[in-house]
Image (tube, rainbow, N blue to C red):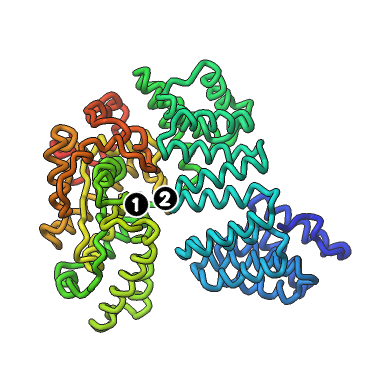
Amino acid sequence: MLNQQTVTDKPGTHTSLMQQALAHYDAGDYPQACTACDELLQLLPQEYTALHLAGLIATAQKRLPAAAEFLKQAIRQAPDAQTAAACWCALGKALRAAGDLRQAEEALRRAVQSDPRMCSYAIELADIYAEGWKLNLAVKTLKTAANRFFNDPVPCAALGNLLNKYSRQSDALTAYEMAIKRKPDYAQAHLALGSTLIMLGKFAEAETALREALRLDPMIKAYYQLAQVKKFKLDARDMEAVKQRLDPQLNATKDARVDALFALSKIYDHSKDYSAAFRCLDEASRLHRSMVKFSSAEYEAMAERIIALFTPEFLARYAGKSTSDLAPIFILGMFRSGTTLTEQILASHSQVRGGGELLCMVHIAKQLGETWENRGNAALGDDAAVISDLMQAAARYQKMSAHVAGNASRFTDKLPTNFFYIGIIHLLFPKASIIYCHRNPVATCFSCFQNNILMPANGSFSHDLTDLGRFYKLHERMMAHWRKALPGRILEVEYENLVEDPESGIRRLLDFCGLEFEQQCLDFHSLKRPVATASVMQVRKPLYKGAIAHWKNYEAFLGPLFEALRADTPKSDIV
């Protein structure tokens, strides 16, 4: 980290320019920081601190090739191993942002070797390993850091976060408890512990952890989760604290206010004050949108490319070429359409292990896309090359999902947005089951809006009613394409029908997956497994019909959503 103390002792103009560049960088004014730093480099082209700062500025501006060059020069000019290590770390971050994980790993390994006293370098290296799906290396790196920095809670918490990400919640609990043992007042560890306990269905213990996090840090993002755990009945002191966060004089962070507003919306909804609940939702969503960018146009362009490539002819040409015996059960559809419920039912079967929201297909699709794009627009390559690509992708997926599959004969992959990748799934895994969950469009979209749904990689589509409607329409378009291109390949499950007649729906699900009926699938709510989605409370109780038409309490406020959904869609198909 650069600061005023790192400024090289240069007279007059040099020091002034460095101070200006640092001040602008710290304030987030990267164009002005870049101007001042460029002037300084004209005067002192070999100055280590200026080169390092120029690299950080270029990284912040996403000028990644320039960032890498500045940082490589800074490494050559570094006066000692410690400053070189800081540059290696910055270079690793720039390379990671550019998508070059192999070089990023090497840079972070150099940082760790150059200055093994810096725990943050090991944590960054573990993050890069995890992003490249080198789970064992990531876990080993964090465990080594936890042992080396035996008084530091941060590597323990980072290990817990990593284990949580890969559905190892029980192990994550141990890591968070170790972090708390090292630093009892570490509020973030108590928050993470509470979140993990919620996933495991241990709600009373979760409440204790969340309240301790709030005691230690009254601004921490815990009230929304606490409102869910308490079934939306916070006590008077909680309500006062939540409302205080919204007092302009308190100047709470946007994150803290968003957390408070979503918590209040749940409380008002439970007390049937729907107007107040919607005001909170609307304000929370506007605040969130100011922090996270989302472009419907980017997803629409991606869908256009997918539809153009995965024609019926293309799919027929390469169907059956993969020899993979892996048979995942892919559960997909819009968020809040019943995907978690469907997974919980299937995971109750003795032969099925629940995998949760795996990101494997997102990475596989990205890698395949890059491979094919690099061959040029004229063709993806000859048949042998494309078949080889598919086989390698199937092998990568099997390796990436090995931690989930375990000894089970089948496992679920429940990432809703895999509806973009049905064509790839079909080609990679002839024996896979593909299940599409569908629910009333307005009920689905409003539930996303109400439950602060975020997409795993980039996501605030649910924080604007128009974006919600557009994204829903895009998902409908993708599914219409796959129905036409792959007739009979996908089982469609209607949420409302499943709730109305559970046994028939469950038998149909199991039959499609080639599984014998088992009674425990009807008692899915009794299954003790981690659930890391907004449906964590619902799937731990029997099916109920109360949520089916809940959106109608908010009908008067949903004009922009109706308008977006009605684009080329008859009203009768919406409501």
Label 1, on which residue? Answer: 355
Q: Label 2 amino acid?
A: Ser
Classify mark 1: helix, strand or loop. loop
Q: In this orientation, which residue lies closer to the viewer: 106 or 198?
A: 198
Q: Residue furthest right?
A: 11
Q: CA distance from mark 1 to mark 2?
A: 7 Å
Residue 263: image x %, image y %?
Answer: 46, 28
Q: In this orientation, which residue lies closer to the viewer: 89 or 215?
A: 215
Q: Inspect this view and state whether residue 564 appears.
A: no
Classify mark 2: helix, strand or loop. loop
Q: In this orientation, which residue lies closer to the viewer: 188 or 29?
A: 188
Asked whether disc 1 touches disc 2, contact meaning CB atoms under 8 Å apart, the reply is yes
Q: Label 1 amino acid?
A: Gly
Q: Residues within 10 Å of mark 1 (few under 14, many from 20)?
A: many
Label drawn at residue 167: 2
Placement of the C terminus among the 4 image quadrants:
top left
> Left or right of 122: which side holds 567?
left
